[in-house]
Amino acid sequence: MSELSGKVKKWICEQGYPVEMHVAKQFREAGFRATQSEYYVDPENGDSREIDVVASCQRDMGEILVRITVCVECKSSTKHPWVAFTSQDTRLAKPASIVQRPANKLGKEFLHRIAQNKYAHQTPLFKMGERNGFTLTEAFTSGKDNAYAACISVAKCARSLVMKAEEASQSQGPVCNIVIPLVVIDGKLFECHQDDLELEVEEIKQATLIWRNQVSNTGHSIISVCALDGLPGYIRSVSKLSKFVFDQDNVFRDMENESLSEYKNRWKHLLITKGSTGST
């Protein structure tokens, strides 16, 4: 390796690119389709923005294309641990922990239909912990709030992907897309909570943030936060969630019978319009 190549490699590592590459590789090895440096449209101002990794798996359930998508913001923070502040009072009712997820119209319909399913309540990522996070920060710094910026980024990306899936449902065919916002940290993640009168701080691998910022256009923004060494376990949880969703044949069959007439009439009109346009 030349001296310049070494300098370029050092710069690349300092910018955090290896973290993105590692995260994408981990998802691919688990059977997901993963792309890096995806662009999305900011739902608030229409600007084009970049997200580090988008990973997804999908399956045709009858006429409905069902997709589980994880949008990932990666942060390298080896010198500054991140802290999730948690509380037993930060919680959602079991049905709300399912329904209040970023999803397009058919995705929301599916989530409402399984919201009372006791097996769904025990499914990884739908199941809430005893304590959940209400805010996230980066320790030992008084500068830019990277934790807040990361949460804003994945929340906006999730909403943008939901809007994109709804556009596809309106123009191409039925899509049911459920989106999971995830922040991955190459560094240490700690939990801080009040235990009686003592402040407890301990290192963790994963946290769930129930964020009151509603930028994702749900009741709350439910965001997963994961240290890099906890990523394999997190991906296994996403795989289990996907398996549960893809096993709900009866739910999707009922949705086909009851929920698709509006879409089918629109697609029929579009096909007729395209046919007429092509013949002139």
Image (cartoon, rainbow, N blue to C red):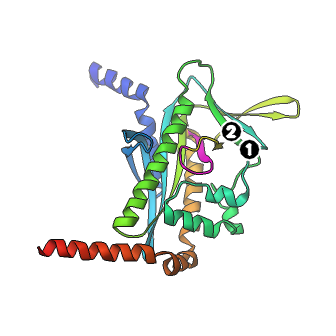
Please indicate, yes or no, whether residue 177 appears anywhere in the rendered image. Answer: yes
* Residue at point 72%, 52% (across, down): 92
Q: Nearer the viewer, residue 258 or 73?
A: 258
Location of mark 2 (residue):
134
Secondary structure beneath label 2 = strand
Q: Is residue 211 above or below residue 244?
A: above
Location of mark 1 (residue):
90
Is residue 213 part of the magenta span, yes or no?
Answer: no
Disc nearer the start of the sequence (2/1): 1
Q: How far apart are marks 2 and 1 (CA)?
A: 6 Å
Residue furthest right in the image: 196
Q: What stretch is highlighted in magenta?
A: 215-227
Within 10 Å of disc 1 (Cα), the crowding (few <14, some 14-19, many 20+) is some
In screen coordinates, is 9 left or right of 262?
left
Q: In this view, does 258 lie above or below 66?
A: below
Discs 2, 1 touching: Cβ within 8 Å: yes
Please indicate, yes or no, whether residue 28 appears anywhere in the rendered image. Answer: no
Secondary structure beneath label 1 = loop
In screen coordinates, is 61 left or right of 109?
left
